[in-house]
Image (spheres, helix red, strand yellow):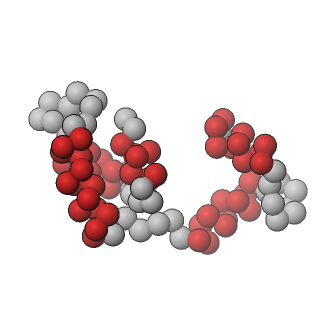
Amino acid sequence: REVGSIVRSLGCFPTEAELQELLAKVEEEEPTGYIHLEKFLPVMTKVLLDGSYQPVPEDVLLHAFEALDKNKCGCITKEELVKYLTEE
């Protein structure tokens, strides 16, 4: 269940469908909810070397922050960002 977070922390941003394909490559025959490191590393190494997943485009990120900027002042507070990232 944490594989998506791990992949994103490595700078890769797959779609949900792409993430499911990745999981299919590294899961055991009978999914247990756990991924063995020795299966994950070669697959993830190939993903990183091939540049398989493009980062989120800058304009998409900017649009997301504009949507969060309720006062339209061009910024949000640290507290607001923490709230959005942890609660919403």
**Up-down relation of residue 46 to residue 70 (above or below):** below
Residue 24 in the figure: left or right of residue 80: left
Quarter holding the C terminus?
top right
Residue 81 position in % (x across, y down): 72, 47
- Number of labels in the image equals 0
Residue 21 visible, this angle: no
> Could you say where residue 63 lies in the image, as x and y percent from the top left?
67, 65
Q: Residue furthest left?
A: 29
Residue 8 visible here: yes
Q: Going by the image, does 50 lie left or right of 11? A: left
Residue under the image location 22 percent in, 54 percent down:
43
Q: Is residue 14 left or right of residue 26?
A: right
Foreground residue among 35 and 73: 35
- Against 55, residue 42 (above or below) is above
Work out which residue is located at the far top of the displayed protein and give it: 32
Indicate the quadrant containing the N terminus: top left, top right, bottom left or bottom right.
top left
Residue sitting at x 88%, y 56%: 71
Viewer-side residue, 64 vs 42: 42
Q: Position of residue 32 (x, y in %)?
A: 23, 27
In the image, what residue occupies the spot 37% across and 64% down? 53
Residue 73 picture quarter: bottom right
Residue 2 on image: x %, y %: 39, 38
Q: Residue at x 41, y 68 (%)?
A: 54
